Image (cartoon, rainbow, N blue to C red):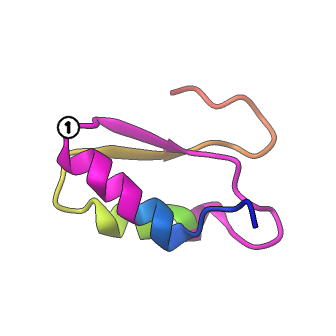
Amino acid sequence: HGHLSNIDSAAFSKFLAERGTERIMLGHLSAENNTPEIAKKCVDFATKDTDTEIFVADRYEITEF
């Protein structure tokens, strides 16, 4: 219902990483149904065999990339 699951996000991140994406920023995480740690862990696992850096945007402040 409008949210991308961590599993789908990880799969798409893997797709991008395998095609040369160097950095991925995870953002707009649900405050009620997710945490930055869980989202990053899922994407880190999916992209572990790549050189892609994974970042998580802060929920309340501007995040430098």
Find numbered disc 1 in the image and state the secondary structure of the residue it sits on: loop
Query: Which residue is pictured at 76% across the width and 61% down the height?
Result: 30
In this rendering, would 39 be left or right of 41? right
Q: Is residue 43 visible?
A: no
Q: Is residue 28 magenta?
A: yes
Quadrant in the picture for residue 11: bottom left
Image quadrant in which you'd find residue 5: bottom right
Q: Position of residue 13 (x, y in %)?
A: 37, 53
Kind of residue at disc 1: Gly
Q: Is residue 56 left or right of residue 30?
A: left
Return the residue at label 1: 20
* Residue 12 position by quadrant: bottom left
- Range covered by the magenta-colored residues: 11-38
Residue 62 in the image: above or below residue 35 = above
Q: Position of residue 28 (x, y in %)?
A: 70, 48
Considering depth in this image, is 37 or 21 the residue closer to the camera? 21
Residue 19 highlighted magenta (yes or no) = yes
Q: Quarter of the image for the N terminus: give it.
A: bottom right
Q: Nearer the viewer, residue 17 or 60?
A: 17
Rendered location of residue 57, percent (x, y): 62, 42
- Residue 32: horizontal and vertical position, in percent? 83, 70
Residue 21 appears anywhere in the view: yes
Q: Residue at x 42, y 41 (%)?
A: 24
Mark 1 residue crowding within 10 angstroms, few (<14) / some (14–19) / many (20+): few
